[in-house]
Image (tube, helix red, strand yellow):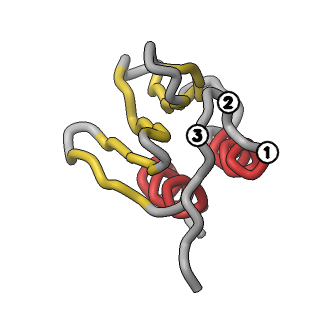
Amino acid sequence: MPTLLPKKGREWTDEEEAEIARLRAACGDGEHKILECGHTDEGDPWCIIYDQPHHRTVVHIARIDRRYVVIVPPKGSSWIATMKAAVDLAIAHISPAQAF
């Protein structure tokens, strides 16, 4: 079955928002890891997970040109076909016990 490309636009779709909710839940109570979302100057939506005690970005997900990119510093970036797969990868990185 072919993978459908995400829609263009500034806002996350309802399906993407549901995946972001899974990511937010994986952050726990927000005391140590927080999730923030925004848009680039070009209008591409993004979200990051920030580790407050260590003052660093843990993972960054963005939709660029109808594709998803997951950036895990300092490991690098991966282009992912679906938002679910992007969030699965992010959750595996921030909380391996909760992955999948």
Q: As shown in the figure, which amino acid type bears the numbered disc 3?
A: Lys
Left or right: where 81 falls relative to 71: right
In the rendered image, which quarter is residue 10 located in?
top right
Quadrant into which the C terminus falls: bottom right
User: To which quarter of the image does residue 36 belong?
Assistant: top right
Q: Picture coordinates of residue 27 (x, y %)?
A: 61, 39
Which residue is denoted by mark 2 in the rendering?
A: 11
Q: Secondary structure at mark 3?
A: loop
Q: Give the mark nearer the N terminus: 1 vs 3.
A: 3
Residue, far front = 8
Q: CA distance from mark 1 to mark 2?
A: 9 Å
Q: Nearer the viewer, mark 2 or mark 3?
A: 3
Q: Amino acid at mark 2?
A: Glu
- In this rendering, is residue 48 above or below 70? above
Q: Name the quarter where the N terminus is drawn.
A: bottom right
- Residue denoted by label 1: 14
